[in-house]
Image (tube, rainbow, N blue to C red):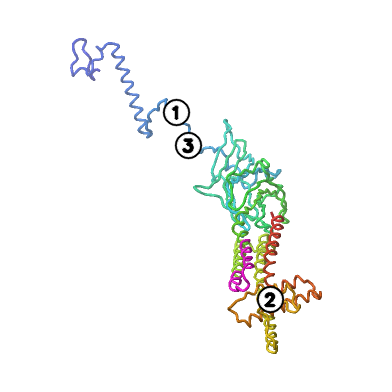
Amino acid sequence: MVKPGGSCPAEGPCSADCCIIDICRMPYFMRLVLFSFCLMALVESRKSRRKRWTGQLEMPKQSHLYKKNLDVTKIRPGKPRPLLRVDDHDFTMRPAFGGPAIPVGVDVQVESLDSISEVDMDFTMTLYLRHYWRDERLAFPSTSNKSMTFDGRLVKKIWVPDVFFVHSKRSFTHDTTTDNIMLRVFPDGHVLYSMRITVTAMCNMDFSHFPLDSQTCSLELESYAYTDEDLMLYWKNGDESLKTDDKISLSQFLIQKFHTTSRLAFYSSTGWYNRLYINFTLHRHIFFFLLQTYFPATLMVMLSWVSFWIDHRAVPARVSLGIMTVLTMSTIITGVNASMPRVSYIRAVDIYLWVSFVFVFLSVLEYAAVNYLTTLQEQKERKFREKVRSLHSFSPFPCMCGMLHSRTMMLDGSYSESEANSLAGYPRSHILPEEERQDKIVVHLALNSELTSSRKRGLLKGQMGLYIFQNTHAIDKYSRLIFPAFYIFFNLIYWSVFS
């Protein structure tokens, strides 16, 4: 460079007053390099000045080994065009409004059958409910033909079918950890709408064969607002539209069959609606009721028969046994009725329990009859005893009733040999006085003689019945056979009819 106002000397070194940089004497190549360096410095200074004014920072260039996926949800400057044009349409109207009914397919996957309540006559079920339909307003362009999946927030912005459960008492959509709702939209406008629901619905049960019964319950689905002219509800794949988990089980019921049906339901004020049915049949397990109801009732009836082998003179034993069995049967009947609805018809278990109760009660009445007849017989013997004593007081001859062998009691033929042999039941006891013992023997012979004479005359009808009523031991003897025979016959008829 040349100092202003001066010139470079032709020869000699440049002085401070003359030149700052001696360019004139530099080679051509060096001057070209110096010029290029100054040009690059000028360009870099302009770039740094532009970055400082715009506020942009230079990011380090990524390596070719790492390739970041393109984020299509990133908000760019300006108003982006949404992929689903939700705001461009009125979704308060159904698809193809004014045209034919929109078909909506339904399929269900039953997750669990939680409980069956006989008292409330309802059941609780958890299921996945899925709807399928096509809405052209939700179609979007796609090169890969892939669907888009959304959660429950989009459901509030678009049209969805208004399906509800007919005869439901309680129902809710699960919301842990978020609402269990899924919406999947395909490029051609087809929509899959799925939700997880627990519903408690009514089930009309018939307990006439309880506990040997089978119940059929139904879960019914229907559109609330749209008739069959606006919405056609159908099972998407027929019977294959209903799927169940193989692990579904109940403690008291055996699930026999799940199947689907559909029909039209008519309401006089609104019209016809498509209704879908989920039907399932439940068969009750009998083993629990055998252990808790039938076996105890049978044992109480058999226990009441023990009194037939107890001596009729043991009044406390037979009375306490009869009362205990009657009260136990009443407790069993009360316990069964407490866990069942109050129906106005007779159930199978009622027939069995009340017949068993009647058998127990008859065993108590049997002892009452035995005790009453024993009292009558004792009164009759007392009268004969008094009559014999009165005869002894006027007789001048001593009584021969105390002989050692019963054959000597035949006297002059007034008593037969069989009547004399009946005295074998009267032991020669030293406890009773001789006079009282003789009176009892005479009374016994007199009573047997009266029965024999009546039988010979043929004046009585039903001679065996008269014998039984006059012999209290015979009543117990025949009861030991009649009561078990009739109860076994009743059980054969009962189990053949209701099983």
Mark 1: amino acid: Lys
Look at the picture and state if 402 lies above or below 242: below
In the rendered image, residue 178, in percent from the top left (x then y), is placed at 50, 47
For the residue pair 336 and 198, the one nearer the viewer reads as: 336
Residue farthest to the top? Answer: 11
Instruction: Give the image location of residue 227, x and y in percent.
Output: 70, 49
Q: Quadrant of the N terminus?
A: top left
Q: Dot 2 corresponds to which residue?
A: 373
Residue 412 figure quarter? bottom right
Res 365 quadrant in image: bottom right
Q: Mark 3 or mark 1: name the one nearer the start of the chain.
A: 1
- Give how far apart the Cα atoms at labels 3 and 2 are: 105 Å
Q: Which of the 4 image quarters holds residue 343?
A: bottom right
Tell me the mark number nearer the camera, choosing from 2 and 1.
2
Q: Compared with residue 325, is residue 124 higher up or lower down, i.e. above or below?
A: above
Reading the image, the residue beneath label 3 is 74
Q: Residues within 10 Å of mark 2 (few under 14, many from 20)?
A: some
Q: Amino acid at mark 3?
A: Lys
Q: CA distance from mark 2 to mark 1?
A: 110 Å
Magenta stretch contains residue 159: no
Taking depth in this image into account, of 317 and 438 the one nearest to the observer is 438
Q: How many marks?
A: 3
- Specify which label sits upstream in the sequence, 2 or 1: 1
The segment highlighted magenta reads: 298-322
Query: Which quarter of the rendered picture does the C terminus lie within?
Result: bottom right
Residue picked out by circle 1? 67
